[in-house]
Image (spheres, rainbow, N blue to C red):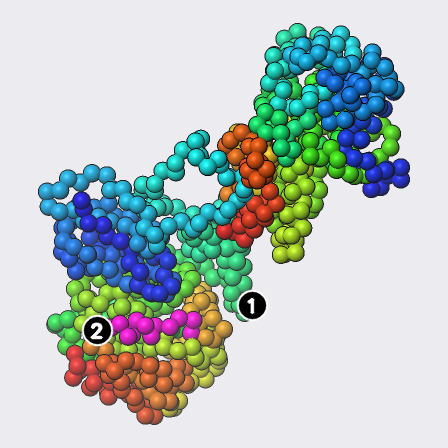
Amino acid sequence: MNAMDTPEARELSYAEAIREAMDIALESDPRVVLMGEDIGVYGGAFQVTGDLVHKYGTDRVMDTPISELGGAGVAVGAALTGLRPIFEFQFSDFAALAMEQIVNQAAKLRYMLGGAVSVPLVMRFPAGSGTGAAAQHSQSIEAWLAHVPGLKVVQPSTPEDAKGLLLAALEDPDPVMIFEHKILYKSKGLVPAGHYTTPIGKAAIRRAGTDLTIVATSIMVHKALAAAETLAAEGIEAEVIDLRTVRPMDRETVLASVRKTGRLLCVYEGVKTLGVGAEVSAMVAESDAFDFLDAPIVRLGGAECPIPYNPDLEKAVVPQVPGILDAARALAKGRI
Amino acid sequence: MPTEVIMPKVDMDMTEGTIVTWHVAEGEAVEKGQPLFDIETAKAAMEVEAPADGLFHHPVAEGTVVPIGQPVAWLYAAGEEVGPPPAVAAPAAAAAPAEPALAGAEVSAPSEPMRAPEPPMSRPAPVADRPRATPAARSLARQGGISLDRIPGTGPSGRVQAGDVRAWLDSAASPSPTLPAVSYETGALAVHRSRGGTGTPVLLIHGFASDSTSWVPLEAHLKHRPLIRIDLPSHGKSPRLRIDSFADLAAEIRRAFDGLGVEKVDLIGHSLGGALALSLADTRPRSIASLTLIAPAGLGPQINGDALTGICRATRVESLKPWLGALVADDSLISDAYARAAMASRNDPAQRAAQARLADVVFPDGVQSFDLKAALDRLDMPTRMIWGRQDAILPWKHALRAPGQVALHFFDGVGHMPQFECAEEVGKLLRAAL
């Protein structure tokens, strides 16, 4: 679905689009409940739930104690027993505290009980660097969860997709992990009114091009698009793919693009080693698209260190537009 | 520590060279100054001498492209233990191109506690047993049924990229709209040897669209020596070989020469054969006692492209005869009988097509695409050049580029084939010299 073509689309921020999705879900489906720390009267650590508690009351919008493991456990149990919980973490980094519930319970129960149950759980993770929140509040850990069979992992980059993927996640019978980039919360975009879904497992081509394929996730999509504009002025046409879903990955969209361009650049904020781009690269290298590669695959990802507090260093450890430009030029001009 | 033998820098623009031939085998003893190997660069082919006495070990494979300054083999002192090839640091000249600054993302904390140091380059030389090529290039080459070996790569370190293969396929598919398809063969060049004669053999290399029989008028004057004639690829009795550049052609001649088993020759070449003789003298200087170039190609861009095309295209005596006339100053020398005999020797359409394709490769668009002036300047064996002042194929003034030690002989009233048109005078000149 394309917001541009929809007459009732309005400009909303990414956070507002998510709130609207939750509002629609709470309104239309009595099984939907929100859970999380300070999501009630405080409105959430990033003000995403806002005033929903006033509209739906504390039975539907529940503050949970400061125990991620406890809260996640309640959410998994609620999902098992018929509710449609949306659980918010204050920072995605705190998922570490809830890993038992996410990885060993939510992801596995369908398998361990022979398909007799499923866990229709949605978890929302404010993620990424750029807020000066340092090492324990700035990570991009989507690859951790994407490594677990049984979980679906999405990373919306636009307000439209933030809403559409959340509504799609609610329709999914299994746990869906949504990584929302904190820097994107205030970004604006056209968002269709009413209920719609953005398909999970489907990437979006944000810009068509012929000279190289840039596969990016989350905020890196915007950096890649900015770079692509500069590249176009230099005569290099980059195709920018917004992966949107990390697991299950949209194989066909990526492979078709690489078959066309013969050059692949992966840009992601998570640590480069063993990250999302590693999987994209390996997927291409293992596929028939390998025969179309006309240069080595290049990855730009986070540095091998925790996110620093110093603002200059914080910028330096994740891919930025100039670095994307350098890599794309080198690739497109056959210098790598 | 053994002495390393490196890829030398032999011209200003050179960044890498190809090992063409090793003259010694693994384990052999060599002396300083002894010819050790031949290299080819983008511009030239050269013989390289041993830098020291020693036992020869660890050569890189023939055909390998090696950056300048990188070791290509090692010379061990007698009694020195020969282990695996010694490790060397990458010399500055051969250092990999600076890695592009991919992103700030690679910047680590100042102390870099988590990054292992890059190991120093420890291999003696990049030894490739197959050409560097991208998957896309390999796939295209596979589909096109061609080998990557001959496709020049324009990527980093000579990596063949898809565009290189496409360009190659395009140029091979349509060298010129008028050229017919060519079927190629494999095999060694035909070599004809005379009986009789003593002393140093005389090696004769004929010109384009000719063959070894063209030497008959001159041979009467050279009978005192053993005579060896080589037929060019796709000429005379030689197989039709695919040739993609002048360097390719020169390499075929060099291979044929190396197979002759002769220590020294007096070398004579005419026209394109002159250019090949010059190239051979440049790469095998110790084997060439003297060099005679008759109206040689390779000393200037001009050549009579119409005559080349006309001779290649001719399928009848009527269309061939005028072009044969262009080869000589006095066209009454070209009788109908001569023209008929010439046409009879050109009655194989496959061979004509192969010659047309060869002309298109070495003289594209009627231009001499290679310049051997530098090779001519390097020669140190006695060298003479013979030219007819009425040459309508290659301008005799190209001879004036020769350095002072080359003897120049110009014949008035003679065209492109002095060895035919004034065989007596040329013969006398050679008899006095050889």
Q: What residue type is labelled 2?
A: Asp
Give the structural element (helix, strand or loop) at label 1.
loop
From the image, tell me which residue sits under label 1.
Answer: B177
B138 magenta-colored: no
Name the image quarter holding residue A215. top right
Chain label for disc 1: B
Q: How crowded is mark 2: few (under 14 residues within 10 Å), some or many (20 or more)?
A: some
Quadrant in which the C terminus of chain B appears = bottom left
Q: How many labels does the image show?
A: 2
In the figure, A13 relative to A84: above or below?
Answer: below
Q: Mark 2 points at which residue?
A: B380
B402 sits left or right of B27 in the view: right
Residue contact at pointers 2 and 1, CB within 8 angstroms:
no
The N terminus of chain B: image quadrant: top left
Whole-angstrom CA distance, mark 2 to mark 1, is: 43 Å
Q: Which residue is drawn at 45% across and 75% down?
A: B367
* Residue drawn at point x = 18 percent, y = 46 percent: B2
Q: Which residue is drawn at 71% across and 35% down?
A: A184
- Residue B284 coordinates in the image, percent (x, y): 24, 65
Which chain is mark 2 on? B
